[in-house]
């Protein structure tokens, strides 16, 4: 897998670095985890990486991607949507349990 940086800029207002890149690969599209690891190693990045997207380019063995690098996971959670931080923190698994009041309200409406 080879990573080519297309654009790299610092966003001081949000306290992050934004990177647009291309990934060239053999075989199937690499996983988000592999892309994050290679991006971190290639650039010597420190901090919390939010991989916004990796989109394969039709008809070729490459993908375009967009990543945001924050100084800490806490800072990222303050700015990013919760589903994005869950996706990037590896917090998969079971969906969150809904509060009891919400469950009861829904059950009451169906009757």
Image (tube, rainbow, N blue to C red):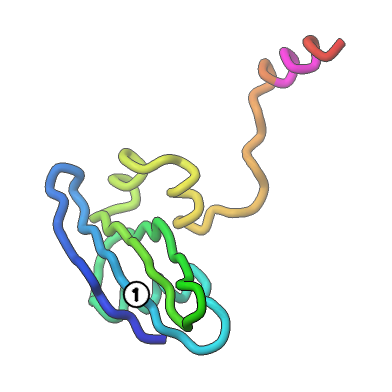
**Residue occupying image coordinates x 46% and y 65%:** 55
**Residue occupying image coordinates x 46% and y 41%:** 82
The C terminus, quarter of image: top right
Residue 109 at least partly seen: yes
Find out whether residue 101 is within the magenta segment: no
Question: Would residue 10 appear left or right of 58 to someone viewing this image?
Answer: left
Find out whether residue 104 is within the magenta segment: yes
Question: Would residue 80 appear left or right of 16 to someone viewing this image?
Answer: right
Residue 79 is situated, as x and y percent measured from the top left of the image, at 31, 40
**Residue occupying image coordinates x 45% and y 85%:** 25
Disc 1: which residue: 22
Return the residue found at the far front: 59
Identify which residue, 5 or 10, lies in the foreground. Answer: 5
Main SS of the magenta part reads: helix
Q: Quadrant of residue 98?
A: top right
**Residue occupying image coordinates x 32% and y 39%:** 78
Q: Is the residue 35 above or below the residue 99 in the image?
A: below
**Where are the magenta residues, as a range?**
103-107
The N terminus, quarter of image: bottom left
Residue 13 is situated, as x and y percent measured from the top left of the image, at 14, 42
């Amino acid at each position: 897998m080879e990573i080519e940086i297309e654009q790299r800029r610092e966003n001081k207002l949000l306290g992050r670095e934004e990177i647009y890149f291309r990934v060239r690969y053999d075989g199937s599209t690499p996983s988000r985890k592999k892309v994050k690891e290679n991006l971190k190693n290639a650039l010597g990045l420190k901090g919390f990486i939010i991989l916004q997207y990796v989109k394969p380019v039709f008809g070729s063995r490459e993908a375009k991607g967009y990543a945001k690098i924050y100084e800490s996971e806490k800072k990222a959670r303050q700015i990013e949507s919760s589903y994005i931080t869950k996706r990037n923190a590896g917090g998969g698994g079971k969906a969150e349990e809904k509060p009891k009041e919400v469950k009861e309200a829904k059950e009451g409406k169906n009757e």
